Image (cartoon, rainbow, N blue to C red):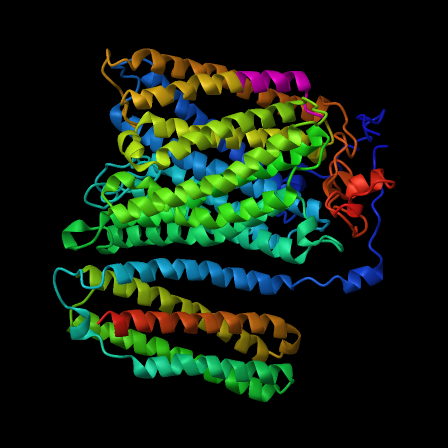
Amino acid sequence: MTSTVLPAAPAKVQEQWKLPDRGTIGIISLIITESSLFSIFVTAYIFYIGKSINGPYPKDVLHYPILATVCLLSSSGTVVFAEHYLKHGRMGLFKLWLAATMLLGYIFLVYTGSEWRKLIFQDHLTVATNVFGTTFYSLVGLHASHVFVGLCFLTLVMIITLLGFDMQTQLRRFLFLSWYWHFVDAVWVVVFTVVYVVGR
Amino acid sequence: MSSIDFPLEFPHEKPSEFSFSETLYSWVATVDHKRLGLMYITTALLFFVVAGIMASVMRLQLAFPNQHVVQPDTFNRLFTMHGTTMVFLVGMPMLAGFANYLIPLMIGARDMAFPRLNAFGYWIFLFGGLILYFSYFGANGLSGAGSAPDVGWFAYSPLTERAFSRGASTDYWTIGILTAGLGTIASAINVIATVFTMRCPGMTLSRMPLFVWMMLVDNWLILLALPPLSACQVMLMIDRYVGGHFFDTQAGGSAVLWQHFFWIFGHPEVYILIFPAWAAVSETIPVFSRKPMFGRPAMVAASVSIGFISLGVWAHHMFAVGMISMANTFFAASTMLISVPTGIKIFNWTATMWGGKLRMSTSMLFACGFLLQFLVAGLTGIMLGVVPFDWQLTDSYFVVAHFHFTLVGALLFGLFSGMYYWYPKVTGRMLDETLGKIHFWFLCIGFNMTFLPQHWLGFLGMPRRIYTYAPGRGWDDLNLISSLGVIVQAIGILAFILNVIRSAKWGKPSGDDPWDAWTLEWATSSPPPEYNFEKVPVVRSSRPLWDLKHPQDPDWKYE
């Protein structure tokens, strides 16, 4: 006997055999791996708190980024609304809340940019100034780059919605993007705490 | 129904109706997991030969004292490139190749969860490897001090800082490996998604083949352990290019931080590397002992525990760095702890063989070689976990012997066991047993000639990475034996290459199931059709083909 005839799974069995969706596992795995990446940069930041030989020091130059934080955290809320309206087919409201999410994310990035401009040109803090500079720009920069990537994808979703593509069929994928966005927010909570609260 | 039954005629092969460029395109643009798996393995074998030649040159240089076969700088590049290539460009793609080829077949799926991501993973690994090797040509940089990286495969700072590593050689190391690492992470996401979401009906996690279990744990480790490597490499680039101070001691940075971050990656990495060998022999030992795996649940539990514990042992690579005693004690204890599940696995493989009807095919020979050599490797590892012992033997040839016993003695032998086992499935032809036995015995004898004496060289105080040594220290004879072993190993490897190439065209046709095995991949043709299975299979136990062949005594009655 050289070939074994396997029993084929009848249709009913195949229907009842429910496994998780591969996209869900994919995005969860991505979030886990990114968490591992961020935790190394956070560890480096914490390790170097108080170890700069020369100034400027965190307490001299860092101010709570209240507006930016409020914007980013509320963008997690607006994206949930967007999801809700997409699920119910209310495309106008979906686009509205999606635009709100994008605007809030954009404001966050603009704020980060202006904070960095102040730090670089007024306070003369760069990556090369001291270990505070190195770890600050690396960690906050890594986070901001993730916000940027998320914003790019949100923009892509907006563009294809405006072009008339039926986004309702892509609810699952929009959900994955919103999970990524929530992850980016959660990381900001950690970064905010470590850099602006603990580290000062 | 236990004899190997070969068909009388090999299915007639039609001359290909595709032109050369069409065939080439079909390989370059493929997303088929089987083709990508083969591409991974073939590329890995090519890098293996290159890195093996580097090792041969190093052993030639070290065969006699005070030799000048190569310059000291060249020697530094050789050991760096040898280590980096073997770990990142041989070990990791072998893992990806075996996983991508076999997992869908073993779980009754048509392909991986994300076929295009799979292709991305392969090509970015290849480009990363090519970037690393381009350093031989392109690394001169502004100071003209380049060429291949020479900082060791773990690239300790502050040697790697711009002040001490001029030219771009370190950057080629960083960027090449960073690039290849992205592919590995992509591959890990793919494997995890596939295993969790694409098993055929009836295949609960507890009924999955052990190969799939071990690859699952392995890829979880990759997900957690690769980002620290990418992180510290990005930090190194920030230091080198924009004046950062992550590892710059003069600005308050810490060079030891690199070691922590690197080994947080590096220790799980060596477990990541060895899991495929464990996966392969967990399939071959039962089949060639004609007995199901002893203690299957314990094997799964042990693998998962090793996965967890391996994330907490990293600083045993740093005992000599000067950490506080509390840290040394903690890491020594966790290293001891990880020996428990590892020992369970060795006992279970042995117990599987005990009382079984052993078939000493080449695959089984390699599995036996794996068992004995992995035992030695594990024991020397535990010895190194004793902190005062490590203080004497760190950075000596004892460590070199230990990790070559794990990486060559265990990993390579385990992978060869798998290759002799699955080659018939991949090609439809058997590998020649005579050449296989020549391959095994020459490799086994040569490997032990090279690496067993290195344990004593370590005891006698020979440090690693030295390019030559003075005569009269008692190191001369052992080094000579070690170097002569290379010749014996090379003959073995040549026999293997010859076997693979010859058998592809002239090997005995194998049929679907030459070994009378039990897992799903043996239920489809050899080689499998592009869609793997005609109909989605359903399984009731962990050995579906046993159930089919023995309907009066199926496994699901006992599981």
Residue B483: image quadrant is top left
Vertically, is B247 above or below A92? above
> What count of labels does the image hold?
0
Vertically, is B374 above or below B308? above
Residue B266 location (% of width, % of height): 39, 44
Q: Quadrant of the N terminus of chain B?
A: top right
Say if the magenta span includes residue B267.
no
Say if the magenta span includes residue B442.
yes
Residue B111 location (% of width, % of height): 68, 50
Picture residue at 77% right of the left edge, 33% below the top: B513
Using the rendered image of the protein, determine whether residue B545 is visible from the camera's viewpoint. yes
Vertically, is B194 above or below A123? above
Picture residue at 48% right of the left edge, 61% below the top: A32
In this rendering, would B452 be left or right of B206?
left
Looking at this view, is B484 or B405 the one in front?
B405
Residue B332 location (% of width, % of height): 35, 42
Single out the residue that lies furthest toward the left: A54
Picture residue at 82% right of the left edge, 26% below the top: B5
Vertically, is B166 above or below A32? above
Q: Which residues are magenta?
A: B430-443
In this rendering, would B280 be left or right of A116?
right
In this rendering, would B415 be left or right of B510?
left
Residue B442: image quadrant is top right
Secondary structure mostly seen in the magenta stretch:
helix
Looking at this view, is B404 or B46 the one in front?
B404
Using the rendered image of the protein, determine whether residue A103 is visible from the camera's viewpoint. no
Residue B397 location (% of width, % of height): 33, 25
